[in-house]
Image: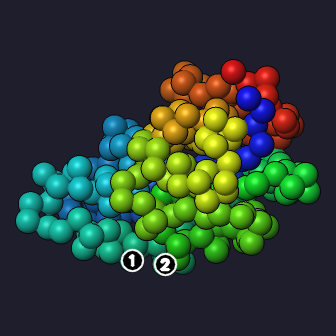
Amino acid sequence: MAVTAAVFDLDGTLVLTEERNRVVWKRFFNGYGIEVDAALTAQLTGRRGLDSLSELSHLFPDRDPQELLDEVLAFEVSDDLPEIVVVPGANQLVRRLQSARVPLALVTSALPAHLAARLLAADLLDVFDVVVTGEDVTVGKPDPQGFLMACEQLGVPPQRSVGFEDSPAGVAAVKAAGMRCVAVTTTFSRDVLADADLVVDDLTDVPWPIDEVA
């Protein structure tokens, strides 16, 4: 079945913000005397902060996850965070698809307040036909809800859509939605992203249409 729509993750897929996110989470956890190791970082990456904090409730007895998330978000306004960097080929790929009138959606675990700066950095503001944020779903990645919602709003079946992701949680969500998946190794290694149909180093020279992707 021919692919006719493209659905993109944001952080790590279109823009490189993982170092920025690591600094924010490190400052938050260190404030509670908790060291951030590789396992904890992997648990946080590509997922809604609220979901991650709910799963880590044993570290914060009697604390509401939403209140904790508000504390995390307060670190986002710091002036000394690492800059947002555009993934090579991201702007060119999305603009190429836009010019070809391919339906485009964005599915991100980020909150609406964080979208503008990231999309402006990539010069992709107001490009997407549909935007699904962490506030629009009741459960985040690896659950497919966000991708299914995007496909429904685009009016394109998941089987005719391809999702672009950078994390295992994102890849799992795309595949669970019944979509084909392209994974970019900006955040995780190829072996960790092996469940994707196609794994690339960045978004330069990604073929379209990609019906040859299994």
Q: Position of residue 157 (x, y in %)?
A: 64, 43
- Residue in view at x 33 percent, y 74 percent: 70
The Cα–Cα distance between marks 1 and 2, rounded to whole angstroms, is: 6 Å
Report the amino acid beneath label 2: Val
Question: Callout 2: helix, strand or loop?
Answer: helix
Q: Position of residue 125 (x, y in %)?
A: 74, 71
Query: Which numbered disc covers residue 74?
Result: 1
Report the amino acid beneath label 1: Ala
Viewer-proximal residue among 170 and 29: 170
Q: Examine the rendering and report whether any part of residue 50 can be seen.
A: yes
Query: Which quarter of the rendered picture does the C terminus lie within?
Result: top right
Say if 173 sits above or below 24 in the image. Answer: above
Q: What residue would you read off at disc 2?
A: 77
Question: Is the residue marked by circle 2 packed among few (<14), some (14-19), or many (20+) residues within 10 Å?
Answer: few
Q: Position of residue 40 (x, y in %)?
A: 33, 44
Q: How many marks?
A: 2
